[in-house]
């Protein structure tokens, strides 16, 4: 992954699709522009991913960053 090919785009799109299935209520307010923003941001946070499932969690994190009201809990505001 990333050595022979750049799979970031594909894994990001797959993670968004999986997140929409896992948390459908959170994606009710999400339009295509926000989805594109999430995929773009995944290129920035991608280096922290060690295994594929972590992409799903990063999508959730990015969504909560853009729409703080959907957070279930928070350790610190800001």
Image (cartoon, grey):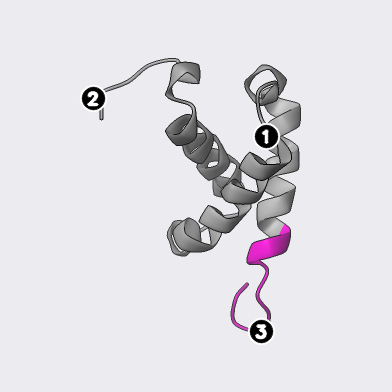
Residue 23 position (above or below residue 42)? above
Question: Image quadrant of residue 73?
Answer: top left
Q: Residue 13 at x, y = what percent?
A: 72, 52
Q: Earlier in the sequence, mark 2 or mark 1?
A: 1
How far is mark 2 from mark 1, CA to CA?
Answer: 24 Å
Mark with earlier residue (3, 2) = 3
Front position among marks 1 and 3 = 1
Q: Which mark is residue 19?
A: 1
Q: Residues within 10 Å of mark 1 (few under 14, many from 20)?
A: many
Q: Secondary structure at mark 2?
A: loop
Q: Where is 1 relative to 46, above or below?
A: below
The span from disc 3 to disc 2 (Cα, nearest Å) is 39 Å
Q: Looking at the picture, tell me which residue is in the foreground, 38 or 54.
A: 38
How many numbered discs, if any? 3
Seen from the viewer's position, the closer of residues 18 and 52 is: 18
Q: Residue at x 60, y 76 (%)?
A: 2
Q: What residue appears at the point 70 percent right and 27 percent down from the top-left corner?
A: 22
Q: Which residues are magenta?
A: 1-10
- Residue 4: in magenta span: yes
Residue 3 point in image, percent of width and height: 59, 82
Instruction: Find disc 2 in the rendering and name its residue.
Output: 76
**Disc 1 versus disc 3: distance between alpha carbons?**
27 Å
The residue under the point 74% across, 49% down is: 14
Q: Which residue is mark 3?
A: 4
Is residue 11 in the magenta section?
no
Percent x, y of residue 5: 68, 80
Q: Is residue 15 above or below residue 71?
A: below
Looking at the picture, tell me which residue is in the foreground, 62 or 47.
62
- On the rendered image, what quadrant is the N terminus found in? bottom right
Residue count near mark 3 (Cα–Cα under 10 Å), binned few <14, some 14–19, many ≥20: few
């Amino acid at each position: 992954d990333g050595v022979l090919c750049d799979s970031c785009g594909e894994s990001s799109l797959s993670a968004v699709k999986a997140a929409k299935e896992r948390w459908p209520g959170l994606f009710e307010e999400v339009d295509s522009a926000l989805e594109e923003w999430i995929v773009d941001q995944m290129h920035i946070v991608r280096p922290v991913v060690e295994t594929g499932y972590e992409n799903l969690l990063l999508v959730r994190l990015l969504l909560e960053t853009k729409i703080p009201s959907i957070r279930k809990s928070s350790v610190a505001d800001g």
